[in-house]
C-alpha cells in the first residue's frame, strides 16, 4: 500500500510541471489561441452541442415531454426504416446520384486545371478562368430556376434548340430517366471551374527546373504532364477523393428538392429529402433523426474506410 501511494504521489508531482508547462505555452502564444477561438467556439456550439439531440433517434420524442422525458424505444425507428418498402429505393437513388456525380464531376477539375496550367496566353487564360469560375457564385435557388426555365417544355431555350435541330426533345423535368443526368450536368457546370483552384495551387508548386530538364531530354508536352504535373497533384487528388467518398450518401437536398416533382419522384427521392419530409413536414422527429443518423454513420464509415485504404496503398491520407 505504501509503495502504491508513493507511485501515485510521484505521478501527481510529475503531472504538475506538465500542467504548468501547458499554461506557460498558452500564455506565450496567446495570440494564436485568440485567432483560433472563433473557429473553435463555432464548431463547439453549432456542431458538437447539437449532438446531444441524437438520442431522439432512440426515443419516441414527444415535444411536451422534452428529450429527457420522452420514453426510450431502442432501435425501433431504425428497424422501421430498414424494413420499409422505400428503403432500397432511397439507398439506390442516393448512391447512384453520388457515384454518377463523382465519376463525371471529380476528374473534370483535374483535366481543366492541367489545361489551364499549359495555357501561355495570359488574357485568354484569365478570361476562360473567370467564365468557368462564375457559375459557382450562382445560388442554388437561382440555379434551379435557370434549369426549369431552360428546360421548360413550352418556353425552354434548350428544348427549342433541340427541336430546331430536328430531334424530339425529352421531358427533362418530368422524366425520371433524365433527372440524374440533369442534376449531375448542372452541378458539373456550376462547380468544375471552382474546383480547379486547388489543383492549380498544387501545380504552382512544381519546380520549373523539372520541366526544363524534361525538355532537354526531349520529353513532349504530354509526357511532361503525365510524369511531372500529375504526380505533383496526386496527394491533392487523394485527399479530395477521400473527402468526397466520406460524403457518398450526403447528397445535398436543396437543388434536388427544388427540381423534384411528383412525376420524377421515383428517381429524385434521396435520403436527405426523405428526412426533410418525414421530419419537418410529417413531424416524425424521432424517425427522421434515426434516418439522418444512419446516413451520417455510413458516411463516417466510408470516410474511415477509404482513408485506411489510401494510407495502406500510398503515402497520402487524412490521418
Image (cartoon, helix red, strand yellow):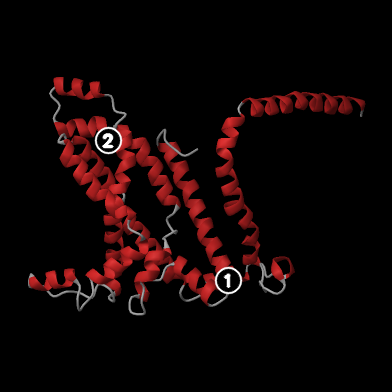
Q: Which residue is mark 2?
A: 230
The numbered disc on residue 287 is 1
Lateral position of residue 70 relative to residue 309, left or right:
right
Q: Is residue 162 left or right of residue 76?
A: left
* 102 sits to left or right of 18: left
On screen, residue 18 above or below 137: above
Instruction: Look at 92% across and 26% down and name the residue there.
Output: 2
Horizontal arrangement in the rendering, residue 121 relative to residue 302 (left or right): left
Instruction: Please rate how many residues cluster around mark 2, counting C-alpha atoms within 10 Å: few if below 14, some from 14 to 19, many from 20.
Output: some
Q: Visible in this render: residue 217?
A: no
Q: Is residue 101 above or below residue 275?
A: above
The quarter in which the N terminus is drawn is top right
The part of the image, by quadrant, that contains residue 294 is bottom right
Q: Residue at x 24, y 24 (%)?
A: 208
Residue furthest to the right in view is 2
Q: Nearer the viewer, residue 64 or 56?
A: 64
Numbered tag placed on residue 123 in the rendering: none
Quick one: label 1, few (<14), some, or many (20+) residues within 10 Å?
many
Residue 283 image-quadrant placement:
bottom right
Q: Identify which residue, 44 or 72, lies in the foreground.
A: 44
Secondary structure of the residue carrying numbered label 2 = helix
Instruction: Look at the numbered disc 1 and give the secondary structure of its residue.
Output: helix
Across and down, in percent, residue 76 comes to: 62, 71
Question: Which residue is depicted at the point 79% across and 26% down?
Answer: 11
Residue 97: horizontal and vertical position, in percent?
35, 62
What is the C-alpha distance between the residues marked 2 and 1? 46 Å
* Residue 38 in view (yes/no): yes
Amino acid at each position: 500500500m505504501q509503495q502504491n501511494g508513493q507511485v501515485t504521489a510521484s505521478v501527481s508531482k510529475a503531472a504538475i510541471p506538465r500542467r504548468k508547462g501547458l499554461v506557460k505555452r498558452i500564455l506565450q502564444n496567446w495570440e494564436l489561441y485568440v485567432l483560433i477561438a472563433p473557429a473553435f467556439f463555432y464548431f463547439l456550439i453549432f456542431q458538437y452541442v447539437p449532438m446531444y439531440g441524437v438520442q431522439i433517434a432512440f426515443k419516441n420524442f414527444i415535444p411536451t415531454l422534452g428529450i429527457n422525458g420522452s420514453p426510450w424505444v431502442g432501435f425501433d425507428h431504425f428497424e422501421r426504416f430498414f424494413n420499409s418498402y422505400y428503403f432500397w429505393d432511397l439507398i439506390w437513388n442516393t448512391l447512384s446520384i453520388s457515384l454518377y456525380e463523382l465519376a463525371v464531376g471529380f476528374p473534370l477539375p483535374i483535366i481543366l486545371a492541367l489545361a489551364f496550367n499549359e495555357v501561355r496566353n495570359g488574357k485568354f487564360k484569365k478570361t476562360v478562368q473567370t467564365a468557368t469560375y462564375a457559375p459557382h457564385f450562382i445560388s442554388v435557388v437561382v440555379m434551379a430556376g435557370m434549369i426549369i426555365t431552360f428546360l421548360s417544355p413550352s418556353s425552354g431555350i434548350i428544348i427549342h434548340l433541340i427541336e430546331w435541330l430536328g430531334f424530339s426533345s425529352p421531358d427533362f423535368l418530368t422524366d425520371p430517366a433524365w433527372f440524374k443526368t440533369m442534376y449531375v450536368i448542372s452541378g458539373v457546370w456550376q462547380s468544375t471551374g471552382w474546383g480547379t483552384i486547388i489543383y492549380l495551387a498544387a501545380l504552382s508548386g512544381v519546380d520549373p527546373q523539372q520541366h526544363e530538364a524534361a525538355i532537354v531530354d526531349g520529353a513532349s508536352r504530354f509526357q511532361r504532364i503525365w510524369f511531372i504535373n500529375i504526380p505533383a497533384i496526386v496527394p491533392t487528388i487523394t485527399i479530395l477523393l477521400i473527402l468526397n467518398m466520406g460524403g457518398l450518401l450526403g447528397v445535398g437536398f436543396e437543388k434536388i428538392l427544388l427540381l423534384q416533382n411528383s412525376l420524377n419522384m421515383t428517381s429524385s427521392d434521396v435520403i436527405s429529402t426523405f428526412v426533410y419530409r418525414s421530419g419537418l413536414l410529417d413531424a416524425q422527429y424521432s424517425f427522421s433523426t434515426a434516418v439522418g443518423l444512419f446516413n451520417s454513420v455510413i458516411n463516417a464509415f466510408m470516410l474511415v474506410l477509404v482513408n485506411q485504404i489510401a494510407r495502406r496503398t500510398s503515402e497520402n491520407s487524412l490521418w
